[in-house]
Image (cartoon, grey):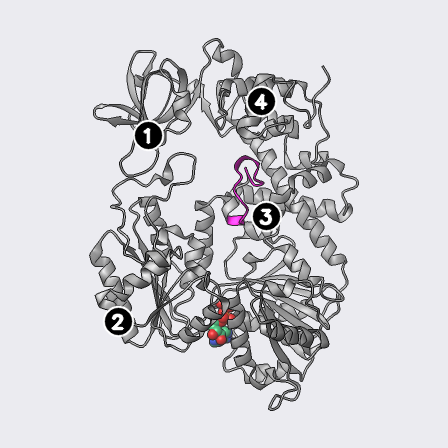
Amino acid sequence: MAALTRQSRLTGILGAAAKKLEKARDLRTVGDLLDFLPRRYIDANTSGRLSEFTVGETAVLVATVVSVQTRSMRNRRGKMLEAVIEDADGTAARLVFFRAYGHEQRLLPGVRALFRGKLDTYRGGWQLSHPDYTLLDDDQEQDSVYAGGLVPVYLNVAGVTDMQMTQSLRLVLDQLDVPEDPVPGKIRTGRGLSDQLDAYRLLHLPQTQADVGRGKRRLRYDEALVVQTALAQRRARYDAEEAVPRAVRPGGLLAAFDERLPFELTAGQREVGAEIAADMARDRPMHRLLQGEVGSGKTIVALRAMLAAIDAGAQAALLAPTEVLAQQHERSIRAMLGDLGEGGMLGGAEHGTQIALLTGSMPKSQRERVLLDIVSGPVGIVIGTHALIQEHVMFADLGLVVVDEQHRFGVEQRDALRGKAVRPPHVLVMTATPIPRTVAMTVFGDMDTSALTELPSGRQPIASHVVPASKPAWLERTWRRVAEEVAGGHQVYVVCPRIGDPDDAMLEVPDDGSAPDLETYGDEEPEVVRELHGVYQMVQRLRSEPAMDGLRIEMLHGRMSPDDKDTVMQVFGRGEIDVLVSTTVIEVGVDVPNATTMVVMDADRFGISQLHQLRGRVGRGDAGGICLLVTESDNPTTVSRLEAVAATTDGFALAGLDLELRREGDVLGSSQSGQRSQLRLLRLTHAKDVELIEQAREDAIGIVADDPELTKHPALAAMVQTRLDDEQAAFLERG
Ligand code: ADP
Ligand code: MG
């Protein structure tokens, strides 16, 4: 038989099993199968009888299924599965899965399996809740398949047992041609990494736990190297570009602006300002990421860079993720510049410039006038949304692109805007989400980074509290508190996870919350069982809330027309709305200093970083802020996550926590396609992986410096190419 390669089709090698693998998991080639890594391992060497284990211990045992029962649950969709198993002594244990799905096809009476799970008691007997298990084939001696006693457990493939998986992998690995290793031998030796093919062998056919560790380390390194190589190449391409230097000119707009700033710049703002000025004075394009907590004053830093660009004869564009934000930027920048923003107009300052707003919803005639002003030159600062990226927007001389709240824009969009300049413009990307170093290296590895770590003085801290909605008195207290704030002359946001239905603006009956939260069980996403609060319903409810009598309550959400949204924001900004019920459209950048209180409904539905972002909308003035996180969940994990958010306002600490609790895919914003997703093994939070990423980064920079197009490293080039498929591209696009 001809030797196999990663591209060989599984049909023809594995026979009937190949069809099942393709059907269940879309595994078509040898490479697909190799990358279908075990999820866990059960160490059969520690296997024993039930009597050998005590409660609370992890028990590993071979047992036979005696009886199985599935039943519907009262409070939620889906069925649970209960089984009775018996070990070799005939000792019985109850087995329970809160989700029968998948298990009911496998755990049939008479089936023998190796189980691994924490031993509990239930009504005086033994119990295992959702254990790992692998079915044992009757006609196969276990020892002949699992040489070291370590049993790989795979994601379920209908009709193929784990034992058959192992046999298939042995077959494939035995016939596989040794391919060229993508990692150069010198690096492998230097870093103590096993060969790639060995790594697959170690993971699929391990003898010991140490094997698994070595195999994983190598594949993790590969993941890191792919990303770092792509970033290093990207970085090298930037550095090869020639930009027009835009050095600060004394006595210009920037100087005039600095002179009339109503406050002192913080030390951080000055420092970062100097870094940016130095970057922009060079003849290669700046690519700088500016991180800074909400309210740390990034906008001023960006505006000063834009003014410097204008002083140097260029234009600057500010890209905002939403129309609300673009409009707000325009208003606040106009206000800050005063007559400096009315250059060439009656009453404008002598060397002033002009500001233009460009959004998708502008009337055609107005839009055309703005487009003309942008291409003919009088406009120095263009503020806009995605509309700025469109083909027909042309600039006279675009020198600086500022991207606000980076996470909603991708590299492609940034590149499209860069393409509007005669020569590559300088690029400043701003983010309010504190980014741990690993993520910075991974996602923004092609940029230089700066951080604003202090808030402008005079900022009041935000006090946050978790409000259990299951206690009506607490919720009542919340609304009274809201009314008190309003009575004190302040304003309030109430944030809901969804818009809801205008025709169904009735009070919703909340779930009694008595059922256990399923988040911790099973492989699938938790079901949304209770209705989440919608904006429409909430407005109705608050308007009829006795404590809120007479308050001006309005709504803001993404289905409103851009004009309506802008109007509501302006009216709210003028203090003519007391309570604004909204979705997360207010998440980024909205700045109304008089808003002191935020109530987040179904707070458990938001991520940690998102909650932190949200509450950054309050406490922006000098009155301090309160954030009330309302949840109906009584799941301890969920509640403690919210408590953690309430306990600190340190964005970096929260970002770290966020990383720990979420899967990397979420953190990086890429879709969760499970087995094929890029960072399957790499954990951006694990100290060991941080080191691995640093090593891979160093190695990648070395390789690319010497061989930018990877012509001397074809196997590495191929690995980067194939792994940077669409999904991966999307992940890198986060820059
Ligand atoms: P960010 O965009 O980083 O969230 P902003 O740039 O919107 O923060 O700044 C928040 C508020 O702080 C604005 O009202 C701004 O005018 C004000 N501000 C910025 N820098 C200073 C400073 N050095 N001293 C006092 N107030 C400042
Ligand atoms: Mg901002």
Could you tell which of marks 1 and 2 lies nearer the N-terminus?
1
Q: Which residues are magenta?
A: 667-680
Determine whether, in the image, residue 646 is placed left or right of residue 413: left
Query: In this picture, is 677 found above or below 591?
Result: above
Secondary structure of the residue carrying tag 1 is: strand
| Disc assigned to residue 731 | 3
Camera-near label (3 vs 1) is: 1
Horizontal placement of 708 versus 51: left or right?
right
Three-letter code for the amino acid on which mark 3 is drawn = Phe
Quarter of the image for residue 257 reads bottom right
Q: Which mark is residue 80?
A: 1
Residue at 34% across / 55% down in the picture? 533
69 shown above or below 289: above
Front label number (1 vs 4):
4
The residue that disc 4 covers is 19
- For badge 1, the amino acid type reads Met
Q: 691 or 562, which lies in front?
A: 562
Does residue 664 sit above or below 536 in this rendering? above
Comparing labels 4 and 3, the label whose residue is closer to the camera? 4
Q: Which mark is residue 484?
A: 2
Q: From mark 2 to mark 3, how far is it between C-alphas?
A: 45 Å
Q: Quadrant of residue 289?
A: bottom right
Whether 201 is among the magenta residues is: no
Label located before the other in sequence (4 or 3):
4
Task: Kindly identify the amino acid type of the residue bearing the numbered disc 2.
Answer: Glu
